[in-house]
Image: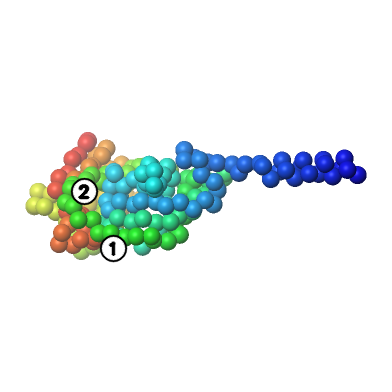
Amino acid sequence: MMKNLLVLFIAVTLLSCKKEPLYGPLNLKNGQEVELLINANYGAENDILLKMPENVSAGAPLSNFEEREPGYIYRVKAKFHNNDNPPADGSSQEFEFVKVLSKAQYKGNESFKIQIITSYVPGGPVIRMGRKGSDYFFIPEKLQFTFANTTIQSQLEEIMQNADEIRASWPKITQPKWKSITATVIHDPNKFGKAYLVQKLDFVQ
């Protein structure tokens, strides 16, 4: 009897000491809550999610944060999830938005870069622009592209015409005229949080 109790005690002890698996470069537990820092440059090359307080790349995307506004710096609480069977177009790891901890308006005027052509798998390269009337949009109904001068305006119109041609030819697969388009932008002070002011466009054929 005592021998059986001893075996049971050892088994329970071993089970209780078993460590939960850790995932990703930050060694996070599945379901672990963390604090993340989100910068003001929505959709930019430097739009990198940071884990706090280490101030290092979070290494996974943030989902369900629909209230994010360009031009604002957020600290949020999020829950880490590891998915052993991710969808073909999804990530095996992600952070799920829980709540906003703080929100502060960006006060600077430094320029940053945005890639207007993005490649998706499956699907290939896509021009990330739309229009409504005479206005150009980076994100439909949310984030407009305004322009610093008429040269930029003409270039945006050329990009938009190519995008319209590609969309009109669907389902035929048509590539954009350019391999890449890099826009140098700032937060438009006249439409803060609603528009990026395009100062320069660099095309690679």
Relative to 189, does residue 37 appear above or below in the rendering? above
Q: Position of residue 162 (x, y in %)?
A: 24, 48
Viewer-proximal residue among 112 and 114:
112
Mark 1: which secondary structure?
loop
Q: Amino acid at mark 1?
A: Glu
> Marks 1 and 2: which is nearer the front?
1
Which residue sits furthest top? 205
Tell me the quadrant of the picture where the N terminus can be found. Answer: top right
Residue 107 left/right relative to 10:
left
User: Residue 141, labelled with which disc?
Assistant: 1
Residue under the image location 39 percent in, 61 percent down:
100
Q: Dot 1: within a 10 Å radius of its alpha carbon, few (fewer than 14), some, or many (20 or more) residues?
A: few
Q: Secondary structure at mark 2?
A: helix
190 vs 20: above or below:
below
Which quadrant of the rendered structure holds the C terminus? Answer: top left
Query: Which residue type does callout 2 highlight?
Result: Ile
Q: Residue at the location (51% across, 44% down)?
A: 28
Q: Is residue 157 visible?
A: no
- Side of 88 relative to 201 (left or right): right
Tag 2 residue: 159
Compare residues 37 and 171 and report the one nearer the observer: 37
Residue extending farthest to the right is 1
Q: CA distance from mark 1 to mark 2?
A: 19 Å
Residue 22: which quarter of the image? top right
Q: Position of residue 121 (x, y in %)?
A: 42, 42
| Colouring rule applied to residues | rainbow
Q: Residues within 10 Å of mark 2 (few under 14, many from 20)?
A: many
Give the mark nearest the N terminus, 1 or 2: 1
Residue at 20% from the left image edge and 39% from the top image edge: 203
Q: Residue at x 15, y 59 (%)?
A: 189
